[in-house]
Amino acid sequence: MNYTKEQLIDALVYEWDYLCHDDYDPEDLTSEEYRKEMEKLTIEELIEETSTDEGYTLDEFMENNG
């Protein structure tokens, strides 16, 4: 399945919020700051940011974080 840049960013920000909630560090970017950083990336770079591969696919990532 193909995903839009906005869908990938939304999923990455969702994951970011989840990870930061479980392991809070005051040095971490806020959700808004993280979103702005993700908006600078290409779709290919966003997909790379998901850390998906054959073992954990992009579709699974999007289902879990979309």
Image (cartoon, helix red, strand yellow):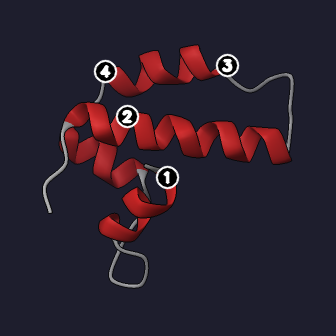
Above or below, 31 relative to 6: above
Distance CA(mark 2)–CA(mark 4)? 10 Å
Q: Specify which label sits upstream in the sequence, 1 or 4.
A: 4
* Callout 2–callout 3 Cβ contact below 8 Å: no
* Callout 1–callout 4 Cβ contact below 8 Å: no
Q: Amino acid at mark 3?
A: Thr
State the image coordinates of residue 14 (x, y, percent, origin top left).
Answer: 55, 40
Mark 1 sits on what residue? 65
Q: Specify which label sits upstream in the sequence, 1 or 2.
A: 2
Distance CA(mark 2)–CA(mark 3)? 14 Å
Residue at 44 percent across and 43 percent down: it is 11
- Label 2 sits on a secondary structure element that is helix
Q: Is residue 42 visible?
A: no
Distance CA(mark 1)–CA(mark 3)? 18 Å
Mark 4 sits on what residue? 40
Q: Amino acid at mark 2?
A: Ile
Distance CA(mark 4)–CA(mark 3)? 16 Å
State the image coordinates of residue 55 (x, y, percent, origin top left).
Answer: 41, 84
Mark 2 sits on what residue? 9
Mark closer to the observer (1, 2): 1
* Callout 4–callout 3 Cβ contact below 8 Å: no
Q: Quadrant of the N terminus?
A: bottom left
Q: Specify which label sits upstream in the sequence, 4 or 3.
A: 3
Mark 3 sits on what residue? 30
- Label 4 sits on a secondary structure element that is loop
Within 10 Å of disc 4 (Cα), the crowding (few <14, some 14-19, many 20+) is: few
